[in-house]
Amino acid sequence: MKRLILIFGLLSLTVLNNSCKDDDPEFNDCWRAPNKTQLKLTLLEGPTITPPSKISMFFKVTDENNNPVGYLTEENFVIYEKGVNDSCPRVISEFEAKRKISSREQVFNHTTLLVLDLSGSVLQQSLQQVKDAANAFVESIVPPLPDPSISMGVYWFDGEDVLHELEPVTSSLVDLKNAINGVTQNISNDNSTDLYGAVIKADAIADGILADYQALDITAATSVVLFTDGEDRANRYPKQQAYDAVANSPKEISWFTLGVGNEINIPDLQKIGRNGFFQAASISNLTTVFQQIATVVNNEANSYYFFEYCSPIRSGANNGLIIEAYEGKEVGFLQSNFDATGFTGGCQF
């Protein structure tokens, strides 16, 4: 009986010790790479250090199909750091490290370029439907009260070697709609379709917008949404030049294409619409499909995150940093390093 009691006592002690071991933060707060990631976090800027100990990062979140994941909040992110004395990246609680997602208007601007095919077939057969669909799209993107962080420009192309400006980039919903409503059948002097030229010129405009914001130290992104009812007929530019313009454009530029009718070149539009190709079966479905694109563009605009937190680490030139994101059961992460030399307390937002 005494031996049985002794064995039971040893077993109880073993169970107790294992329980304490499981509760030890050394074992339960270490980051482990997930077996599968459904979210992709792409670091665009940072980590940027602001004394005394603030770290900021600008990144984009997409799902495994490269669709934007928007509207995440601080609760969707977990921070891990690995200092010189840590055997693994350790979770940083909100009590140790203040964190926030800054409001978009303070740190980020998004511009949409709507590029419309106004070649002869559109002007003669479906102009009013295109105008109605474009207005619905604009209303879904640009708020009624001007928001400086959200803007749009409207351009159009025909067979000329010009990407015509219908309305320059603006935050005014009224100005955008007035410009669209003002389009008439006699707006064009060339009934052909310079699709590839429109792509090349739209890329140059989008690049210029990003450069202008960069010069002002404002982080920005652009979405190009191109509509056509046909394929390139003007043959002004090689197809590959248009493909290369899209492929080589910065990752801050997203490309979406919308084709309608049976004369479109689907492989072309899929290649140009690297972030999404949409097809309307008929002109009567155009507004519905434009609104579907608007949903994606809005998610795109809100899938960029400026994340800031106050690090509790106070030294070390090569500290590890992991930001893990959760959306439902989907997870993803990004890894980086930062120099905490000279870090002190007193970090504020």
Image (cartoon, rainbow, N blue to C red):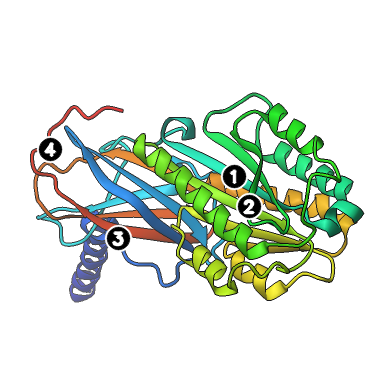
4 or 1: tag closer to the N-terminus: 1
Q: State left or right for residue 9 relative to residue 240.
A: left
Picture disc at residue 159: none
Instruction: Find disc 4 in the rendering and name its residue.
Output: 343
**Spatial CA span between label 4 and label 1:** 40 Å
- Residue kind at label 1, given as amino acid type: Thr
Instruction: Find disc 1 in the rendering and name its residue.
Output: 112
Q: Secondary structure at mark 3?
A: loop
- Residue kind at label 3, given as amino acid type: Trp
Q: Secondary structure at mark 4?
A: loop
Q: Secondary structure at mark 2?
A: loop
**Spatial CA span between label 3 and label 2:** 54 Å
2 or 1: tag closer to the N-terminus: 1
How far across and down, in percent of the image, does residue 299 sit? 59, 48
Picture disc at residue 162: 2
Are circles 3 and 1 on residues that touch, CB within 8 Å? Answer: no
Q: Nearer the viewer, mark 4 or mark 2?
A: 2
